[in-house]
């Protein structure tokens, strides 16, 4: 039996998400909001399909063109997202073609995103950290991002590449373990910083003065020549 009513499926989701357990992570105490353009719940096979879906919990958000779940339990469930997948949390964001998101203890726990490539970004004040890889594992509970497969990271100036890189969003730290590089070296490119631009009140540069040349009078030869 299939139910194509979005309101029935969404109401069931929100009802199950209501009794949240207290946890060390404040996000786990927040409600989970689900919005979708449409839903199809196959009760017989226990499969739920959403289109144009957005799941929000505190500062964490998951958006995609399509999502499939095998149950409505946020205690321990896995959701598959496909098509223009965007995941944001703690000032960081991921974008990819597909992702698998895990819910544990009534919170968005982790996300495994894949693409060609999958991309990551985090705004840090005036600097922006960016990365890409064939696969990115994002652990929301620890704030760690693991980039695997042609991994690349930059802080807007310097770059680091390797087979696998691990970035801590909270510590703003990159770790490249030798055992995860497959025999390939980790490369770091340090780009020179551009000189700071002159501020609006800075005095303009003044060219040094050059004494003008004086033409000799008519009939006068160069200095030192006899008349």
Image (cartoon, rainbow, N blue to C red):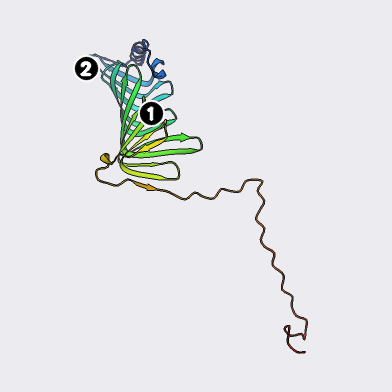
Q: Secondary structure at mark 1?
A: loop
Q: Secondary structure at mark 2?
A: loop
Residue sticking out furthest to the left: 45
Residue at 67% from the left image edge and 51% from the top image edge: 203
Which x, y percent locates residue 200? 64, 45
Which x, y percent locates residue 209? 69, 64
Q: Are marks 2 and 1 in contact (CB under 8 Å)?
A: no
Quadrant position of residue 116: top left
- The answer to which of 42 and 219 lies nearer the viewer is 219
Location of the C terminus by quadrant is: bottom right
Residue at 35% from the left image edge and 33% from the top image edge: 145
Residue beneath label 2, please?
45
Which x, y percent locates residue 67? 31, 24
Residue at 41% from the left image edge and 24% from the top image edge: 60
Q: Is residue 136 visible?
A: yes
Q: Is residue 85 visible?
A: no
Residue beneath label 1, please?
143
Give the label, 2 or 1, closer to the camera. 1
Quadrant position of residue 157: top left
Residue sticking out furthest to the bottom: 227
Compared with 179, 61 (above or below) is above
- The answer to which of 77 and 24 lies nearer the viewer is 24
Quadrant position of residue 176: top left
Compared with 99, 128 (above or below) is below
Q: Residues within 10 Å of mark 2 (few under 14, many from 20)?
A: few
Q: Is residue 89 left or right of residue 194?
A: left
Which x, y percent locates residue 7? 36, 14
């Amino acid at each position: 039996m299939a139910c194509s009513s979005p309101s029935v499926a969404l109401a069931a989701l929100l009802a199950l998400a209501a009794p949240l357990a207290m946890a060390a992570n404040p996000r786990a105490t927040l409600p989970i909001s689900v919005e979708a353009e449409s839903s199809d719940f196959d009760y017989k096979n226990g499969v739920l399909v959403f289109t144009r879906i957005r799941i929000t919990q505190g500062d964490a958000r998951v958006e995609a063109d399509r999502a499939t779940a095998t149950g409505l339990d946020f205690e321990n469930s896995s959701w598959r997202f496909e098509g223009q997948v965007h995941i944001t949390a703690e000032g960081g964001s991921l974008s990819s073609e597909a992702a698998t998101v895990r819910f544990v203890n009534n919170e968005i726990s982790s996300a495994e995103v894949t693409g060609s490539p999958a991309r990551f970004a985090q705004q840090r004040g005036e600097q922006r950290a960016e990365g890409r890889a064939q696969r990115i594992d994002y652990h929301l509970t620890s704030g760690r991002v693991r980039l695997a497969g042609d991994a690349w990271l930059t802080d807007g100036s310097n770059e680091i590449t390797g087979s696998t890189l691990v970035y801590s969003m909270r510590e703003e730290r990159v770790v490249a373990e030798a055992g995860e590089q497959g025999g390939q070296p980790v490369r770091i490119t340090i780009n020179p910083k551009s000189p700071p631009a002159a501020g609006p009140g800075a005095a303009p540069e003044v060219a040094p003065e050059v004494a003008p040349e004086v033409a000799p009078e008519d009939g006068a030869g160069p200095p030192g020549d006899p008349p």
